[in-house]
Amino acid sequence: MCMTMPERWTNSSNFCLIETQFHLKKYRHFLNWKPNESILEVGFASGYNSSQSLQPILPKDYKEFVATDISDVMIDYAREHCDIPKSKFYQMDIGGSIDEKFWERFDHVFSFIVMHLVKNPSKAFNNIHKMLKLGGMAFLTFFDKIPCDSMFDELSRHPKWSKYGQEDMISSYFYSSNPEEEYKKDLEAAGFKNYVFEVEKGSYNFSSEQECNGEVILKNHINMIDEITSDTNTENNWKTVVNKKRNRRQTVVGSNREQNEVEGVEGRECEETDSGLKPGPYKRFTHKWLESKTN
């Protein structure tokens, strides 16, 4: 999936920021920095999440920080707006073919809430393993499924909205009966072998209905958004779909690391509270790869 609205993403991605800060704080003890590190972040987007979560904890003596994203628009925006020392910016599809200049280049690879959006996660994990140096480590967070998946699945069969490629928005293993096992197979096939599976519980409160709806709209194609915003009836129909799907039971997932984590979230129906919309309790499934790259 490719997002193309960097400013709107920056203003509407509070959930990603909170989750990333939570995981980096909780699992920071796994980050064994080396002198003169080469560091890669996959799915950098506008750079806002990284600037508020990852950048503050990077070692001062790193050699290079490489930011990549599948979206040219996002990378161009990040290049112009992010002031990161010793940084380089590249357009990259982590699930596609990767330039050999990145092979065995990095001591750490980071990616936050991205891998479930990659259409070929097996290839993506293989690419990450190849880009790590021997002894390198990856820290990746992602979901197995997201609350929007069933909505995009329905829209992909809708006579009006199917033309916008809704299937591209659906998480990689949405149709699998056991996404965690699918991801484990992908990780092991890529070369990540020794990891631990843990389960946590947590929740997230949307601050407003606007924030909740914004999460959905940001994940859709720009030409579909243009049609929505130019047609009042269309916008009302879209909100009906969003509100309907927001209250479905979902399973979400999120985190992993080669020294890593993979986390999941099992939600229940949204609740109206004084502080906003609350998705309800969920479980985070956390996989930790407790080994460095060894081959």
Image: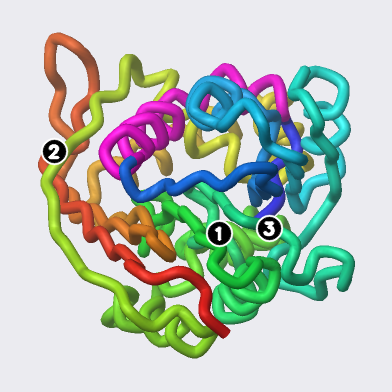
SS label for mark 2: loop
Q: Nearer the viewer, mark 2 or mark 1?
A: 1
User: Is residue 84 something one can see in this rendering?
Assistant: yes
Crowding at dot 3, Cα within 10 Å, few <14 / some 14-19 / many 20+, comes out as: many
Q: In the image, is residue 18 above or below residue 194? A: above
Q: CA distance from mark 1 to mark 3?
A: 23 Å
Q: Tell me the residue at 47%/55% (across/down).
A: 140
Q: Nearer the viewer, mark 1 or mark 3?
A: 3
* The magenta stretch spans residue 12: yes
What percent of the width, then of the height, locates residue 127?
67, 73
Q: In the image, is residue 145 above or below residue 54? A: below
Which tag, 2 or 3, sits closer to the chain's start? 3
Residue pointed to by mark 3: 106
Q: Tell me the residue at 75%/38% (across/down).
A: 4
Q: CA distance from mark 2 to mark 3?
A: 38 Å
What kind of residue is marked 3?
Answer: Phe
Which tag, 1 or 3, sits closer to the chain's start? 3
Q: Tell me the residue at 66%/31% (across/down).
A: 61
Residue pointed to by mark 1: 117
Q: CA distance from mark 2 to mark 1?
A: 23 Å
What kind of residue is marked 1?
Answer: Leu
SS label for mark 1: helix
SS label for mark 3: strand
What kind of residue is marked 2?
Answer: Gly
User: Is residue 233 something one can see in this rendering?
Assistant: no
Q: Tell me the residue at 57%/31% (across/down).
A: 59
What percent of the width, then of the height, locates residue 274?
13, 10
Q: Is residue 129 left or right of residue 274?
A: right
Give the quadrant of the N terminus. Answer: bottom right
Which span of residues is magenta-colored? 6-28
Q: Nearer the viewer, mark 2 or mark 3?
A: 3
Q: Give the label on residue 280, or none.
A: 2
